[in-house]
Amino acid sequence: MERNAVTDENLLNFSQYAYNFLLNSVGAKMASRDLEYLPRGQEQAMKDLYVKVYESYCQGVYVDMTQMEQAQNYWMWERNRPDSDSRRKLDIMINDAYSDNRQIVIPIYKKSAQ
């Protein structure tokens, strides 16, 4: 980027910018619905987990369900908002991201000589 004289900090640190964008857009929408009346620290931890899973899901990256179920932030969802829409969506994303979907294999068949 330096050779193109890019000075925009958002572009230079795009990974962090993209994560913050998700946290502010997806997290804000979810917080207004499913996380109101929670202590600020719990709300932030739950948003952070949701956004990390959402990001991995959208990228087609594997999410380890066993590791996820052991995460404290996941148990906050379990304890505080077990029946919320966001919790249901979180579980759907985790269960659907059981493999890495960033590659495609296309078999090539050759015609047999007759």
Image (tube, rainbow, N blue to C red):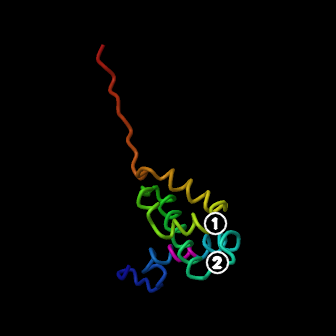
Question: How far from the left and from the top, in percent, is residue 48?
Answer: 52, 73
Question: How far from the left and from the top, in percent, is residue 29?
Answer: 67, 71
Q: Is residue 100 magenta?
A: no
Q: Main SS of the magenta segment? A: helix
**Neighbourhood count class around disc 2 (C-alpha, 10 Å): few under 14, some 14–19, many 20 upward:** few
The amino acid type of the residue labelled 2 equals Leu
Q: Residue furthest front?
A: 79
Q: Residue at x 58, y 66 (%)?
A: 79
The amino acid type of the residue labelled 1 equals Arg
Q: Is residue 20 magenta?
A: yes
Q: Quadrant of the C terminus?
A: top left
Name the mark on residue 38: 2
Lower sequence index among marks 1 and 2: 2
Depicted 82 relative to depicted 95: above or below? below
Q: Residue at x 59, y 76 (%)?
A: 43
**Neighbourhood count class around disc 1 (C-alpha, 10 Å): few under 14, some 14–19, many 20 upward:** some
Q: Secondary structure at mark 1?
A: loop
Q: Quadrant of the N terminus?
A: bottom left
**Along the viewing direction, whichever of 101 and 63 lies nearer the viewer:** 63
Q: CA distance from mark 1 to mark 2?
A: 10 Å
Depicted 32 relative to depicted 89: above or below? below
Residue denoted by label 1: 81
Q: Is residue 67 left or right of residue 40?
A: left
Q: Residue at x 53, y 77 (%)?
A: 20
**Along the viewing direction, whichever of 22 and 35 lies nearer the viewer:** 35
Q: Residue furthest left?
A: 113
Image: magenta residue range: 19-23
**Along the viewing direction, whichever of 6 and 26 lies nearer the viewer:** 26
Question: How far from the left and from the top, in percent, is residue 30?
Answer: 65, 69
Q: Secondary structure at mark 2?
A: loop
